[in-house]
Image (cartoon, rainbow, N blue to C red):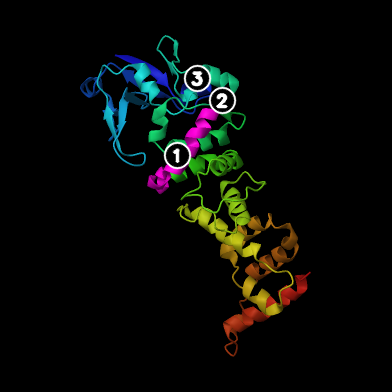
């Protein structure tokens, strides 16, 4: 039984970065032996175990045989005779196919160290074709390491995956997982890869323009991209509520007409209240042309004390509010 540190942890160490977590690979062992040593099995598709003390993940070395569409349909072989080289051959990129033994020796059968030095993303083997999610992973890695270039051979692979239609068999959760990680980095780079290699169908339909994004906030980045693509971008992708809410507010201000008449503005501003005041003011930071007019109107209307005015039973409450709002709009109209 031998244990190796593998994957992103080794890659990050070689890049001079602090690994976020460690992944460990066990060669020459079995499920029974791992359980007898106190490891807790958590993997369903293939054996992954939690260390009894550190709680870090340890996986048995394996080989994979594709048995259907998408990323789920694989048969796994994890017998004790699987070698470290056989396991590494199934990984996505050479920079992720490096292992470090317990004595510090690097096992690098696919020259990942050279690709790290030369800042190259290169797929390891033909197994890359078998998992369409790997195409999106390359786009995500590009967002995390924009200084890296995609090797010509891997560019060809990305195009073939796009042409295969296999991306349609991915789950929403897996696709969003790659998107979310990219949004926390340089999202434009993710989008360039998606567009350049026609990886748009079906998840990123209508991606035509890639904007310059003036924010570090993932929800705002999403709004920028949706805006320049006529709000048709990624319609099939189910996004978290925070993204949906922010995009809804963004669309509202995107369509605001400074030249609109009083009836238009009454209808527009009546939708604001204390409940969405903070979100409204935050979003308006990105709409410089209209914020001078909109911010004071929204603030005053949302914070207006209607107490005594609404006590008059001869007046309809909505009419009272519209009268007040009309005066506020006239005060701040440009």
Single out the mark in the foreground, 3 or 1.
1
Could you say whether the residue bearing mark 3 is in a helix, strand or loop?
helix
Q: Secondary structure at mark 1?
A: helix
Which quadrant of the rendered structure holds the N terminus?
Answer: top left
Image mark for residue 112:
3
The picture quadrant where one finds residue 333 is bottom right
Say which residue label 1 marks: 161
Q: Residues within 10 Å of mark 1 (few under 14, many from 20)?
A: many
- 56 w.r.t. 270: above or below: above
Mark 3–mark 2 distance (CA, rounded to whole Å): 9 Å
Q: Residue at label 2? A: 120
The residue closer to the viewer here, 203 or 1, is: 203
Q: In x, y percent, where is residue 45?
A: 28, 34
| Tag nearer the camera, 2 or 1 | 1
Q: CA distance from mark 2 to mark 1?
A: 20 Å
Stretch in magenta: 152-173
Which badge, 2 or 1, is on the more N-terminal residue? 2
Crowd tier of the residue under label 3, counting other residues whose Cα lies within 10 Å: few below 14, some 14–19, many 20 or above: many
Q: Secondary structure at mark 2?
A: strand
Residue 24 in percent (x, y) is at 38, 22
């Amino acid at each position: 039984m031998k244990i190796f540190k593998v994957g992103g942890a080794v890659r990050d160490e070689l890049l001079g970065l602090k690994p976020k977590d460690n992944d460990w690979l066990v060669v020459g062992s079995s499920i029974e032996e791992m359980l007898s040593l106190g490891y807790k099995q958590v993997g369903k598709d293939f054996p992954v175990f939690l260390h009894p003390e550190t709680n870090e993940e340890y996986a048995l070395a394996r080989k994979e045989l594709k048995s259907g569409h998408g990323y789920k349909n694989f048969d796994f072989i994890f017998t004790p005779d699987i070698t470290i080289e056989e396991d590494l051959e199934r990984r996505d990129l050479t920079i992720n196919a490096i292992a470090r033994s317990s004595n510090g020796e690097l096992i690098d059968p696919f020259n990942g160290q050279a690709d790290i030095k030369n800042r190259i993303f290169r797929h390891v083997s033909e197994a890359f074709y078998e998992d369409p999610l790997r195409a999106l992973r390359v786009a995500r890695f590009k967002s995390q390491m924009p200084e890296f270039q995609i090797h010509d051979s891997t560019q060809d692979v990305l195009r073939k995956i796009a042409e295969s239609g296999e991306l349609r068999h991915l789950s929403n959760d897996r696709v969003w997982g790659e998107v979310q990680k990219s949004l926390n980095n340089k999202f434009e780079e993710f989008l360039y890869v998606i567009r350049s290699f026609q990886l748009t169908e079906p998840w990123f339909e209508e991606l035509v323009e890639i904007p310059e994004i003036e924010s570090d906030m993932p929800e705002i980045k999403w709004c920028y991209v949706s805006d320049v693509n006529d709000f048709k971008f990624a319609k099939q992708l189910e996004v978290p509520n925070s993204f949906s809410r922010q995009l809804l507010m963004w669309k509202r201000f995107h369509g605001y007409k400074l030249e609109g008449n009083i009836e238009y503005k009454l209808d527009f501003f009546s939708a604001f209240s204390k409940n969405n005041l903070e979100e409204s003011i935050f979003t308006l930071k990105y709409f410089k042309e209209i914020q001078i007019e909109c911010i004071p109107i929204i603030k005053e209307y949302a914070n207006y004390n209607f107490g005594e005015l609404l006590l008059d039973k001869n007046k309809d409450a909505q009419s009272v509010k519209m009268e007040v709002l009309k005066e506020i709009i006239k005060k701040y109209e440009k």
